[in-house]
Structures are given as C-alpha cells and as structure tokens.
Image (cartoon, rainbow, N blue to C red):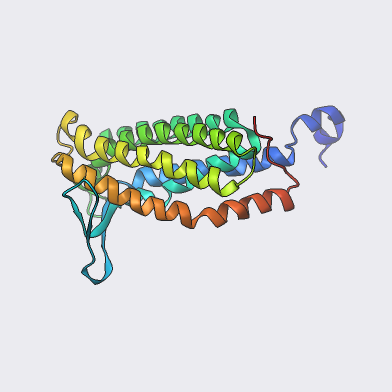
Amino acid sequence: MSDADAAMPDHSRAAYEFSTPQKVYLWLSSFSLACLLIADIVGVKLFRIPFPGNFSFTMPFSSVTYDSVTHTCGMLTFPVTFLITDLLNDYYGKKAARRVVWIGFAMAMIVFAVVNIAQAMPAWDVPFNITQAAFDSIFGSAKVMYIASLMAYLVGNFCDIAVFGLFKRITMGRFIWLRATGSTVISQIIDSFVVTYLAFGLGRVLIPDSGTPMPFGEIIKTAATGYTLKFVIAIGITPIIYLGHRILRGWFGMTPLPAN
C-alpha cells in the first residue's frame, strides 16, 4: 500500500471499490459493446452459404425461393448483444439493460465520427500506405451499414427488453428458455428487416455513391434468410443462457430479480 493509500480514510477507499455485481455489470456491458462495434465494422460484407444438396424451399404465401443463407457478417457477433441484454435484464432490471443499449449507441456514434474524420484526413502518398480509394471503398460503405445497424440495434434491443419483461411476468419468473429465446426470436424479426432495409434499400437511395439499392424482393429474401439463421442461433445459444445463469449464481452468488 502506498503512502497516499495509507493516508486515505477507510470510507474514502471503499468509495473506489466495485462490488461483485458492479464488476459483473461492467464486464457484461463491455463485452456487449465490443460485439456491437465489431458487427458494425464487419457488417459491410455480405455472405452467402448455399443449402446442402441443392436444397431449396418456398415460404408460404410467397413466390420467393430460398436456396441459401445470405446476410451480413455482422451477425457473427450481433446476436450476442441480445443474449447479454437478457442476462442484464434478468439480474439488473430493464433500466440497467436499457442503459447499456444507450451506451452502446453512444460509443458506436463516437466510432462513426472518428471513421469520418479519418476518411477526411489527407492520405500520405507512399507505396507502403493504404490508398485513399481502398480506405473509402470500405469505410464509405460502412457508413450506411453503421446507421442501419444502430437503428436496428436500438429498435431490436428495446423490443427484446420489453418482450423479455412481459414473458417473465407472465411466467412468474419461471421458464428461462421461454423469456430469453422467445424475446430474441421476436425482436430479431424486427432487427433483420430494419437493418437490411436501411442498409441495402433506403440508405442507398438517400446517400449518394453508397451503391445500387437492393430490390425490395431481395430485401425481404435477405432479411428472411438472415432471420432464419438468427432463429437457429437463438435456439442454439439457449444453453448458453442457462450457463450464464449458472455462472452468475455459482461463481458470483447473484440471483435474478423477481418478476414484476
């Protein structure tokens, strides 16, 4: 202990110490923010994974045929934000969960501002530096994705928080899988459509030189197939929800808030 720490009254030192729930909240929040920012950065790239064996199907009441899963690479980490939101909602309440959503939005806006400043900075014209055209081709497209992702992030997570709380009240705090998986499945319907429509449809109409707008039929197809993948992921991570509860209970001695 330093002389300064020794001279500090006990009550003053205690003011700087985090409790276990505060530390857990900090780590969960930070991980959620990292997943959001990663999704915003890599989300400019679309991927397509064909169904095995030339399998395809047509959705009821639709003429669109699905033969692959197509979506943005942002979905690699974006669904994790919903998982963490559910844990925060369960153990800290909806206000604490909403706080993390708003912080995530603010941090993403800071990144967005820095990217725009970096894009405007004059490039050093030397062989070992990245060209301005290469930098602009990636981060210029990412601008549209950023706005789309943030709007989907806000709408989707606030929907998730509301539905999660509703299911928790209806089930009187039982059936973790129902409130966690159910809220994610419902909220990501909205998220998938919003991010696809804003990023590849409306966003490209409103922002010059952002690319050719995707036809509405392709928007529906991309959103639907992307949601199918998110649905599978939501089901697949259900055991992780239970693992998260076990860790918070067993390792940190925390208990979920009662349903109200």
State the image coordinates of residue 150 (x, y, percent, origin top left). Answer: 37, 34
Front residue of this view, candidates 209 and 9? 209
State the image coordinates of residue 195 (x, y, percent, origin top left). Answer: 31, 39
Residue furthest bottom as drawn: 53
Can residue 40 be seen here? The reply is yes
State the image coordinates of residue 161 (x, y, percent, origin top left). Answer: 51, 34
Asked if 224 appears above or below 16 in the picture, the reply is below
Residue furthest front as drawn: 61
State the count of labels: 0
For image coordinates 44% across by 31% down, the residue present is 105
Can residue 132 be seen here? The reply is no
Q: Quadrant of the N terminus?
A: top right
Front residue of this view, candidates 104 and 166? 166
Q: Quadrant of the C terminus?
A: top right
For image coordinates 13% across by 40% down, the residue present is 212
Front residue of this view, candidates 238 and 145? 238
State the image coordinates of residue 205 (x, y, percent, origin top left). Answer: 16, 32
For image coordinates 29% across by 51% down, the residue present is 225
Position of residue 190 in the picture relative to residue 166 (left or right): left
Position of residue 153 in the picture relative to residue 225 (left or right): right
